[in-house]
Amino acid sequence: MNIINIEHIEKIFGDKVIFDDASLGIQQGDKIGIIGINGTGARVKIRLS
């Protein structure tokens, strides 16, 4: 059973589609990582969850 479900995500930069209709499920005990350059808000995203 997933504790977090994210469904039907899309990201587009200008005319470049990065992903379309992506989904993610996280189950209790899963280990995940957030990767990004400094100043992109990864730490804030972790605090909000």
Image (spheres, helix red, strand yellow):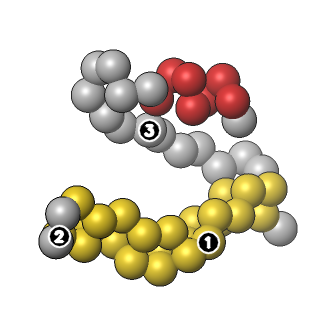
Quarter residue 11 falls in = bottom left
Is 42 drawn above or below residue 28 in the view shown? above
Label 2 is placed on what type of residue?
A: Lys
The quarter of the rendered structure image containing the C terminus is: top right
Sequence order check, earlier mark of 1 and 2? 1
Q: Is label 3 in contact with label 1 (beta carbons under 8 Å)? A: no
Picture disc at residue 34: 3
Is 48 drawn above or below residue 1 in the view shown? above
Quarter residue 15 falls in = bottom left
Q: Which x, y percent locates residue 4?
A: 73, 56
Label 3 is placed on what type of residue?
A: Ile
Picture disc at residue 16: 2
Q: Is label 1 in contact with label 2 (beta carbons under 8 Å)? A: no
Sequence order check, earlier mark of 3 and 2? 2
SS at mark 2 in the image: strand
Q: Which x, y percent locates residue 36?
A: 31, 34
Image depth: mark 3 or mark 1 in front: 1
Q: Which x, y percent locates residue 26?
A: 67, 58
Disc 1 to disc 2, how far (Cα)?
20 Å
The quarter of the rendered structure image containing the N terminus is: bottom right
Is 27 drawn above or below residue 16 in the view shown? above
Residue marked by disc 1: 7
SS at mark 1 in the image: strand
State left or right for residue 45 relative to residue 11: right
Instruction: Using the rendered image of the protein, determine whether residue 27 is visible from the camera's viewpoint.
Output: no
